[in-house]
């Protein structure tokens, strides 16, 4: 049994991205998108690293404190999203994950980046994503060893991904909103039975369409690592005021 878990762990680490099913309908997704759209612009931030807007809905002020998080004020009207998290997502993790939404507009290009630091590149750190708006044309892509882009399928509403593979996104059409459950299984080491059962089922269903890191080849993922000295976030007002001057 232990070796089964080790195998699963290796497979998850090797998964750049794979489609998963979440227990929600297209109507639910539309509702969640509307809830997020109703959040006033001034609650959003500009992230120079990802080159996109973002907002934290569940979390705290200290990025290193992964234990004491709560629903934040901006999430007050996000009832459907809260339902999904409380009834499903949070059951899958020992520590409830920070929840961030990434927003881009047509014409924006998310920088090719790696979501983790060097010492985390080969650790078990799958992240979960749900695209609630703008999925069809603006798909996430990974970079392979030839420098080519390997796009995820536009059919994938939700997926797990390793932040350790260099990835980016070109927004060619309309606003895109992606919900990100960050570092959901850090320190968890596949001890959560609900998650293990769920993910095994998903691998049976979707592994054949997954993008695997071993298939992307020898990619210089380190070049996409964040330099905390250079990167920062700006409030909506600060960033949009800056652009005008
Ligand atoms: Fe990312």
Image (tube, rainbow, N blue to C red):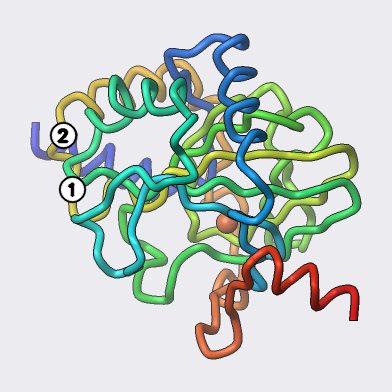
Residue matched to label 1? 188
Q: Which residue is painted at 19% across and 55% down in the image?
A: 67
Circle number at residue 137: none
Image height of 156 relative to 178, above or below: above
Q: Which residue is painted at 29% across and 69% down in the image?
A: 64
Q: Residues within 10 Å of mark 1 (few under 14, many from 20)?
A: some
Residue 110 found in image quarter = bottom right
Q: Secondary structure at mark 1?
A: loop
Residue 126 appears in the rendering: no
- Quarter of the picture containing the C terminus is bottom right
Q: CA distance from mark 2 to mark 1?
A: 7 Å
Q: Which residue is painted at 89% across and 38% down in the image?
A: 173
Q: Which residue is painted at 46% across and 20% down in the image?
A: 80
Left or right of 21 in this view: 237: right
**Is disc 1's CB within 8 Å of ligand 1?**
no
As rendered, which of 156 and 33 lies closer to the eye?
Answer: 33
Image height of 217 relative to 131, above or below: below
Residue 239 found in image quarter = bottom right
Point out residue 169 in the picture as x, y percentages from the top left corner. 74, 51
Q: Residue furthest left?
A: 1
Which quadrant does ligand 1 occupy? bottom right
Point out residue 140 in the picture as x, y percentages from the top left corner. 69, 44
Residue 28 appears in the rendering: yes
As rendered, which of 40 and 33 lies closer to the eye?
Answer: 40
Circle number at residue 192: 2
Point out residue 233 in the picture as x, y percentages from the top left corner. 59, 72
* Contact check, label 2 and label 1, Cβ < 8 Å: yes
As rendered, which of 141 and 39 lies closer to the eye?
Answer: 39
- Quarter of the picture containing the N terminus is top left
Q: Secondary structure at mark 2?
A: loop
Left or right of 205 in this view: 125: left
Q: Residue furthest bottom?
A: 229
């Amino acid at each position: 049994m232990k070796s089964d878990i080790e195998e699963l762990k290796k497979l998850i680490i090797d998964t750049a991205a794979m489609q998963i099913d979440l227990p929600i309908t297209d109507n639910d997704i539309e509702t969640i998108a509307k809830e997020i759209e109703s959040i006033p612009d001034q609650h959003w931030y500009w992230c120079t690293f990802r080159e996109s807007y973002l907002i934290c809905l569940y979390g705290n002020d200290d990025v290193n404190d992964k234990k004491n998080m709560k629903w934040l004020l901006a999430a007050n009207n996000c009832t459907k999203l809260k339902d999904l998290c409380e009834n499903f997502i949070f059951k899958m993790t020992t520590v409830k994950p920070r929840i961030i939404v990434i927003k881009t507009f047509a014409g924006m290009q998310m920088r090719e980046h790696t979501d983790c630091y060097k010492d985390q590149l080969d650790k078990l750190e799958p992240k979960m994503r749900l695209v609630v708006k703008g999925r069809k044309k603006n798909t996430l892509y990974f970079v392979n060893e030839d420098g080519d882009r390997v796009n995820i399928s536009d059919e994938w509403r939700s997926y797990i991904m390793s932040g350790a593979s260099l990835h980016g996104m070109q927004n060619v059409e309309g606003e895109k909103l992606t919900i990100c459950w960050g570092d959901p299984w850090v320190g968890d080491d596949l001890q959560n039975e609900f998650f293990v059962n769920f993910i095994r089922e998903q691998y049976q269903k979707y592994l054949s369409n997954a993008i695997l890191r071993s298939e992307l080849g020898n990619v210089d993922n380190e070049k996409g690592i964040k330099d905390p000295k250079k990167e920062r976030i700006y409030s909506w007002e600060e960033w949009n005021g800056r652009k005008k001057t």
